Amino acid sequence: MAAPALESVPHLERNATNSFYDSDKYDTDLEDVDLEIKTVAPVVEENSIGANIYRSECRKRQLIPMTAILKYLNKDIMKLRHRAMGIEAAEALAAALEINTTIVHLDLEGNKLEAPGALVMSQVLVYNQFITHVNLAKNNMGAAHPTIRASVPLSEVMKRNMEIKHLNLSDNNFTEEDAKYFALGIEGNDQITELDLSNNHFQEKGAQYIGKALGENRSIERLNLSWNHIRRRGAVSICRALQKNKTLVYLDLSWNGLGYEGSLALGQVLKRNRWLKELNISNNRISHRAAEFIANGLRRNSTLEVLKIGMNPLTTNGAQNIIESVSCTCSAIKELDMSGVPVLGEFEFMAGAIQQSRQFKYTHGGTVSNHDAIGRKPNAAVDPMRKVIAHMQSMNLRPLELFRSMDKEKMYNMNKESFRQRLKNADMGLYKGDLEEVLALVSESKQGGVNAAELSRGMKNQVRKEKLEQIRVKQQEKKVERIP
């Protein structure tokens, strides 16, 4: 773009710093003094042209030039938040930014740029190779437009600009379809180190796009995907990407929906990942059962330093599992945030023990005296028939031999009351309800007694039930592994 000759600029503008009416006259910032000192430097001459271009573009659009823009054109940071620019003011600014070589940090958060503004700024950012930090948050760029999808030109910026290191596109109403284009940008970029896509509308499919691209990226170190709608396959895809990605050190997935599937995948990843330092998975619908997967992963992780897992329905049991895993000697956790999660006194004791051995700070939702109803230890509900089998195995007996040891009269058939009493006397840890459940499993009729064949059948059914449960868990794990 050709610069207008200085002679064509009105006298008042060329001597703006001496004008009584110039608003900058009333600024007392030391930065302004610094600018006056530098007026002889060539770079200011170049940016004076940028200022003239900006004024010229404003005149074309019948806009009043913004004093802040004229001031920032000579600085390394342009911070213009919540100015409600709109597209025309953005176009005038873009014309000046195309030739600007001093600004490295461009902050246009909250300026109602929408899709047309995204296109204009993307064209600038493809051309300008001096800007390294870009904040375009809260500009409603994802809003529907008849001809422009903002994520398309922004994706081109990610692929073609070789200088941008930090890119903030949060709170822009981007959707599933936009995630597809951002994934292309992530996969094709090897310069951006910090990317913020939080507060958008990425769901299951969108997260799958991003997860796949993240597995191929080799530059992003900090990624913020909080406050989206990531769950199920999408959550699994993001977590699985950590198996391949070796640069990510900070990941914020808070306020999403990892749930059971995502927690299972995350637990598997934590066993292998050796690069992630900070993980935020607070507010993710992680139950006490899902927390077991994460705890198992933490037991084999030696690099994660900060874990934020608060505001989840972990229960006291889930909290205990997490603190036990963090207490392992291999753990590097320095900060554990469990805000909103109640804990037992035992949790406090273990946390104190950790602080004796390494730097460690923690927060939780308060100490309670007993486990809550859901959070009781799983081993409190062992199947009664499993107790019978465990007793039989400890005595090195087969079902027939166990029955014979109880059948003192050698009748090969016992009435229910006799069988109940023998079970009770055998010290198997069976309670009244347990005894009734075992009787129901080994007696086909209400009136009939119990024989060795029925006892053997009941035990086989219990073993079959346990094997089916093991198969179900393995199938669930394989299902998660197959998710792309």
Image: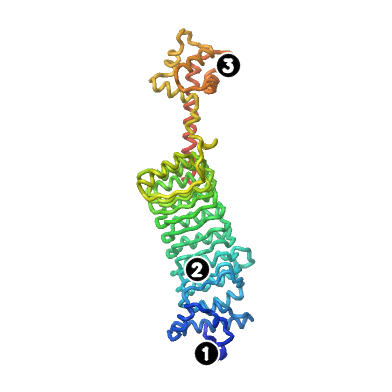
Distance from Cα at disc 1 to Cα at disc 2: 31 Å
Secondary structure, mark 3, is: loop
In the image, what residue occupies the spot 50% across and 29% down?
465
User: Mark 1 and mark 3: span between their CA atoms?
Assistant: 106 Å
The residue type indicated by label 1 comes to Leu
Q: Position of residue 17 (x, y in %)?
A: 52, 86
Picture quadrant where residue 322 is located = top left
Specify which label sits upstream in the sequence, 1 or 2.
1
Q: Which residue is mark 1?
A: 6
Q: Amino acid at mark 3?
A: Ser
- The residue carrying mark 3 is 445
Disc ID at residue 268: none
Given the image, on which type of amino acid does mark 2 rest?
A: Val
Residue at x 50% of width, y 59% of height: 183
| SS at circle 2 | strand
Label 2: which residue? 134
- Vertical placement of residue 424 versus 100, above or below: above
The part of the image, by quadrant, that contains residue 220 is: bottom left
Residues at marks 1 and 3 touching, judged by CB atoms closer than 8 Å: no
Judged by depth in the image, the label closer to the viewer, 1 or 3, is 1
Tell me residue 283's x, y (percent): 54, 49
Identify the secondary structure beneath mark 1: helix
Is any atom of residue 112 visible in this view? yes
- Horizontal relation, residue 442 to residue 333: left or right: right
Q: Earlier in the sequence, mark 3 or mark 2?
A: 2
